[in-house]
Amino acid sequence: MSYCLKSHSQSGQSWGSTPGLLAPQLPCTLCPLRPHSLWNLLLLLWTFLNCGLGSNTQGPGEWTPWGSWSRCSSSCGRGLSVRSRRCIRFPREELCWGNTHEYRLCQQPDCPPAAMPFRDLQCALYNGHPVLGTQNTYQWVPFYGAPNQCDLNCLAVGHDFYHSFGRVLDGTPCSPGAQGLCVAGRCLSAGCDGLLGSDAREDRCGRCGGANDSCLFVQRVFRDAGAFAGYWNVTLIPEGARYIRAAHRSRNHLALMGGDGRYVLNGNWVVSPAGTYEAAGTRVVYTRATGPEETLRAAGPTSEDLLLQVLLQEPNPGIEFEFWLPRERYGPFQAQAQVLGWSPRQPQPREVEPQPLESPTVIPPRTPIPTPVFRAHVLGRIRQAQETRYEVRVQLIYKNRSPLRALEYVWAPSRCPCPPLALHRDYLLAARRLISPDGTQDRLLLPHAGYARLWSPAEDSRVRLAARHCPL
């Protein structure tokens, strides 16, 4: 039998003014419904279910929208928040697909050093209470050797047994130092979307759930053999680079310089110990094996440009390097690398023509010596007779056929001094090397019109650009 909503005037019966009475044997059509009548609405829904659904099994029901996230389960450190939804389905419909609850990580301020860990606190709740069916009481501390790490397994202090008090509370760390949290008795780790149990992972471009399609993979081998011992540029590592790796097998050493011109590791002719270093907003892991293998890794992304160099002590067998770079940064990286002349060979800066010497103490050399071009940090200055002597620390050699020492003296043949060099500043210098015929004097001379500029990234680029047109 089918029913439809009818009022007393429609049914022909005098039942007062109450709407929504049931009239039997009427066709299944929607009848006029007075507003604000909850009873009519319920009957209308019941009629629709009986008249319209038929006997076939329907698909899954529909979820209600997600509720709000709960407060964090922890007052300090890591915890979890939960939100829920309900499945709305008609008779003979399948259950909704998916979960009724969703959990995500939440981060509170760090816990004080003396704060009791969450699992310890749960075990301590049973201190002094009878357990195991006896009147004996114990003091309890967490026990991590049990099979299920999301059970509240507590060890009786001073005894050789533990007891499981059921599941730990949701949000309890699975084990000390672990990233996973216990939820409903299971240890779940968070995906890159912050949801526990999610399998979303960050791709090489840094996008959660991405497919490595928003960045490019840079992978090359630096094979320049090197014409002299010293620091040679390998590659620029641009800002935004991720998953950086460089490796080689030789007695040479990788060196890394920050955007401010300061070395992060293996600079100033000093070999740094293996370990982790902070640079450009990321951690650089530097390792040296017992053999000649040396590697450098960083997850990134870098917050500024880095310069990878090699300190050559023997012929270079090849340095492999790779990193991932956002697509929008690849073009500028290529242009800058070409301007700086880092591919395919190391550039050599333009020679500065030496000026006639006025100092009578310097004996002209028998054979011309190429002008060394290098970056130096001024440590001290002394005026002697008609000369000024600068003590400098060699930071980076751009060109030199004969090795420079870590500490050198640079002579200016006047008391001006001209050109003036300020103490504790970095300069790009092109100093003329003068060696006496008998080899007793070996000086780096900075003539009056010589090249002495305060170091800056712009000056560095100009020197490298000049080298492309004036090779050694």
Image: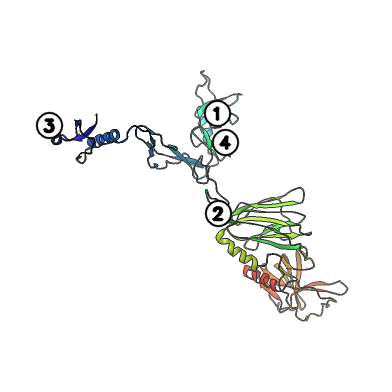
Instruction: State the residue position of label 2.
Output: 213
Q: Horizontal and vertical percent for residue 388?
A: 74, 75
Q: Horizontal and vertical percent for residue 205?
A: 56, 53
Instruction: State the residue position of label 3.
Output: 13
Q: Which residue is drawn at 72% across and 61% down?
A: 268
Front position among marks 1 and 2 = 2
Q: Horizontal and vertical percent for residue 354?
A: 75, 78
**Alpha carbon of mark 1 to alpha carbon of mark 3: how far?**
72 Å
**Alpha carbon of mark 4 to alpha carbon of mark 1: how far?**
12 Å
Instruction: State the residue position of label 1.
Output: 153
Q: Residue 116, can we see it?
A: no
Front position among marks 2 and 3 = 3
Query: Eyeballing the image, is 111 above or below 440?
Result: above
Q: Which of 123 and 385 is in front in this view?
A: 123
Q: In this view, does 364 lie to the left or right of 320?
A: right
Give neighbour class at mark 4: few <14, some 14-19, many 20+ (Cα, 10 Å): some
**Alpha carbon of mark 1 to alpha carbon of mark 2: how far?**
46 Å
Instruction: State the residue position of label 4.
Output: 175
Q: Which residue is drawn at 29% across and 33% down?
A: 50
Give neighbour class at mark 2: few <14, some 14-19, many 20+ (Cα, 10 Å): few
Give neighbour class at mark 3: few <14, some 14-19, many 20+ (Cα, 10 Å): few
Q: Which mark is residue 209?
A: none
The reply to whether callout 2 and callout 4 are in contact (CB within 8 Å) is no
